[in-house]
Image (spheres, rainbow, N blue to C red):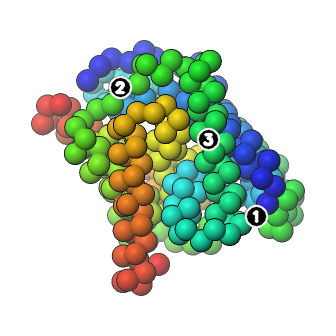
Amino acid sequence: MAITEFTPYSALIGGALIGFAAVVLMLGNGRIAGASGIFAGLLTFEFGDEFRWRAVFIIGMLVGAAWSGLFLFNISTIVFSGSSTMIILAGVIVGVGTTLGSGCTSGHGICGLARFSLRSLTATCIFMTVAIITVFATRHVLGG
Amino acid sequence: MNKLMVFVSGLLFGAGVTISGMVNPMKVLNFLDITGIWDPSLAFVMAGGLIVTLIGYHFIFKRLEPFFASSFKLPTTKSVDAKLVLGSACFGLGWGLSGLCPGPAIASIAFGRSEIYLFVASMAAGMVLAKFAQRRFSLA
């Protein structure tokens, strides 16, 4: 556990960029900018047009992150939490959860809410609440 | 599909999750730790993203079709079902345990940390597993 600095301006600007990403993808190609859905679509290994646009999006993400990491964000501030076992476990749970739940923070929390989707509102309330309870349990009940 | 616009969207997305600080799991966990060392920054990420998308979508959906595709491809399921509730709860648990969600995790591959490779590989395995289970038990 380590205190992180409150950064409202970079948070707001970064958030707005994610919003512009969602707008560009919908306006250009009519798709929802949901990270879990776009990534999961690559795992079919059917190398058609569906595979290609998703791959292009992911490559764009990596270039955008790398560029920002070089000039705008200090990547040495990144701190992971938990053992390798915990990270693997969390990864599997996130993969299963976003597949069954049809989306994650970007797909439901940004794009879904912006479409006034009841499913996305439900999903966002549930994953936020469960995540808050999980952190409370691991940090304040079990002691992290 | 226009690949340039897809690329630009990915670029903005990757820059956004990085600049916002969402790529830092500790920052995410501190946002979720409302009774402890709370860092409200991520509420601003959500607000920024939502405001831009709300306004953008409002005007986009006045059009009949996107620029480079025949139609908007939007989710067709409208009802809240057990799968959505269970899946979202599951995602919340994994997010709360690690501070990692799919977007920032995938973008962070660019930073070359072994923890992220572990996480993304495990997440991919979980996705394949869940898709297989859905087909096997015809839950899809």
Q: In this rendering, is residue A105 above or below B115?
A: below
Check disc 3 and report the residue beneath it.
A61
Check disc 1 and report the residue beneath it.
B72
Q: Is residue B90 left or right of residue A71?
A: left
Q: Is residue B17 left or right of residue B60?
A: left
Q: Amino acid at mark 2?
A: Val
Chain under callout 3: A
Q: CA distance from mark 1 to mark 2?
A: 39 Å
Per the image, label 3 sits on a secondary structure element best described as helix
Check disc 2 and report the residue beneath it.
A79
Chain under callout 2: A
Q: Do callouts 3 and 1 mark residues in contact (Cβ within 8 Å)?
A: no
Q: Is residue A15 left or right of residue B66?
A: left
Q: In this rendering, is residue B69 above or below B19?
A: below
Q: Position of residue A23 (x, y in %)?
A: 74, 46
- Specify which label sits upstream in the sequence, 2 or 3: 3
Q: Nearer the viewer, mark 1 or mark 2?
A: 2
Q: Residues within 10 Å of mark 2 (few under 14, many from 20)?
A: some
Q: Position of residue A8 (x, y in %)?
A: 54, 20
Q: Say the numbered circle drawn on residue B118.
A: none
Q: Amino acid at mark 3?
A: Met
Q: CA distance from mark 3 to mark 1?
A: 22 Å
Q: In this rendering, is residue B85 above or below B14?
A: below
The answer to whether any part of residue A107 appears in the image is no
Q: Are marks 2 and 3 on the same chain?
A: yes
Q: Nearer the viewer, mark 3 or mark 1?
A: 3
Q: Residues within 10 Å of mark 1 (few under 14, many from 20)?
A: many
Q: Residues within 10 Å of mark 3 (few under 14, many from 20)?
A: many
